[in-house]
């Protein structure tokens, strides 16, 4: 059974039902941007893989489902397909790019290679009314990124918008709609309005979630998971690990030991700044390790960027393992904490995200050794 997350506890224990939507990830590099846009509208949102099962509906109780874009062709062998439970849920659906094509394909429409691929800005013209386009002009600018197109909509659906290269730039029926463009990106100026229209006018959300409540739930989740154990944190001084450090420190106090490693690749004065901020200002039990010679020695002669990232990740872990032994005292560390974002996981195309195409490995995702001596915690 899957462990209950902080978000699920928040949704269950809230005195009022928290509005929730889910984004089904078909491998889009902007899937996490969709999640962010939904959360900006004060609707809680989580990214789930395309092969997730229907239990996600019971766990998160979403009011709507958004289907992300993706790099594949839906008609190709082995391409990610829309789960049956999405259609069977009866919930409102917004399909974006590949998500619209997957929706059409699942419902009996026809998707085929486009004679004119669209990558970049385009002008879309509305040809029918739909709640998704409430208060939008008859024509508007969007961002396209696709090589396939819908040639025939499913039975009962109708075209909603066209562009010079897309005779089906949008399609819809009642509370289910698809767009060939990307409303989540900044290059679609009215995209946020469309997402809000979907959430509030189509899904019936009220916008009753805040990031502050999520912070409280995350701190409670850390306390629940860590218990009486100790946590070693990989601190770089950047935003990701700094936020992780702040959350974990608020949760367990001095049982957190941040380790800041000087790998010889830092900016001038950066090591001193990190020690000042986290050691003296925030009062954390910061451990500083100067491992310049170790890192530069391991990297000598390595020219391939992927190999460099994995080498850095491996060496970081070895340094942390040594620091853990030196700092453990009578009670060893059980957890290694690090700041990991949605983009890190998606760009690294980990096994949990089968549909994504790898861009690059992040040393805190794809560079971790298999014989890791810690349990990972990534708030």
Image (tube, rainbow, N blue to C red):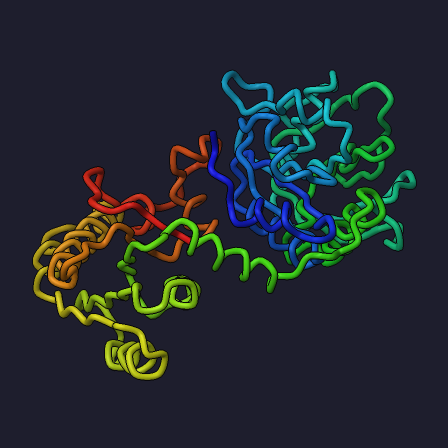
375 relative to 182 in the view: left or right: left
Number of numbered discs? 0
Q: Depth check: 20 or 362 in front?
A: 20
Q: Please tell me whether residue 70 is drawn above or below residue 104 in the rendered image.
A: below
From where the camera sits, is residue 113 visible? Answer: yes
The residue furthest right is 129
Residue 264 placement (x, y as % from top left): 17, 68
Residue 17 placement (x, y as % from top left): 73, 48
117 relative to 164 in the view: left or right: left
- Taking the spot 80% from the left edge, 38% from the top edge, the residue there is 162
- Picture quadrant where residue 130 is located: top right
- Taking the spot 14% from the left edge, 70% from the top edge, the residue there is 290
Residue 160 placement (x, y as % from top left): 85, 37
Q: Please tell me whether residue 245 is drawn above or below residue 331 in the rendered image.
A: below
Q: Depth check: 235 or 330 in front?
A: 330
- Taking the spot 32% from the left edge, 47% from the top edge, the residue there is 376
Q: Please tell me whether residue 292 is drawn above or below residue 324 in the rendered image.
A: below
- Picture quadrant where residue 59 is located: top right
163 relative to 274 in the view: left or right: right
- Picture quadrant where residue 155 is located: top right
- Taking the spot 65% from the left edge, 36% from the top edge, the residue there is 67
In what quadrant of the picture does the C terminus appear? Answer: bottom left
């Amino acid at each position: 059974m899957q462990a209950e997350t902080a978000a699920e506890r928040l949704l269950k224990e809230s005195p009022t039902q928290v509005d929730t939507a889910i984004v089904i990830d078909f491998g889009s590099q902007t899937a996490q941007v969709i999640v962010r846009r939904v959360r900006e509208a004060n609707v809680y949102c989580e990214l789930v893989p395309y092969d997730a099962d229907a239990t996600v509906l019971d766990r998160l109780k979403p009011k709507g489902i958004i289907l992300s874009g993706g790099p594949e062709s839906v008609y190709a062998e082995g391409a990610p397909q829309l789960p049956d439970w999405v259609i069977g849920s009866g919930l409102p659906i917004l399909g974006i790019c590949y998500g619209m094509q997957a929706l059409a394909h699942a419902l009996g429409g026809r998707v085929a290679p486009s004679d004119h691929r669209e990558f970049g800005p385009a002008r879309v013209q509305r040809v029918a009314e739909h709640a998704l386009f409430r208060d939008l002009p008859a024509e508007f600018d969007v961002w396209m990124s696709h090589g396939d197109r819908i040639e025939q909509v499913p039975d009962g659906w109708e075209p909603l918008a066209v562009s010079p290269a897309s005779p089906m730039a949008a399609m819809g029926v009642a509370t289910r709609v698809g767009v060939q463009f990307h409303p989540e990106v900044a290059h679609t100026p009215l995209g946020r309005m469309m997402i809000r229209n979907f959430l509030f006018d189509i899904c019936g959300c009220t916008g009753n979630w805040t990031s502050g409540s999520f912070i409280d739930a995350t701190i409670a989740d850390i306390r629940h998971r860590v218990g009486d154990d100790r946590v070693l944190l990989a601190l770089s001084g950047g935003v990701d690990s700094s936020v992780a450090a702040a959350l974990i420190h608020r949760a367990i106090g001095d049982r957190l030991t941040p380790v800041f490693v000087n790998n010889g690749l830092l900016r001038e004065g950066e090591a001193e700044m990190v020690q000042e901020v986290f050691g003296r200002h925030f009062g954390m039990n910061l451990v500083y390790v100067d491992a310049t010679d170790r890192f530069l020695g391991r990297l000598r002669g390595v020219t391939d960027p992927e190999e460099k990232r994995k080498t850095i990740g491996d060496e970081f872990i070895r340094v942390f393992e040594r620091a853990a032994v030196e700092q453990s005292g009578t009670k060893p560390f059980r957890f290694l904490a690090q700041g990991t974002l949605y983009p890190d996981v998606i760009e690294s195309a980990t096994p949990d995200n089968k549909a994504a195409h790898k861009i690059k490995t992040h040393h805190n995702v794809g560079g971790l050794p298999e014989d890791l001596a810690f349990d990972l915690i990534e708030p």
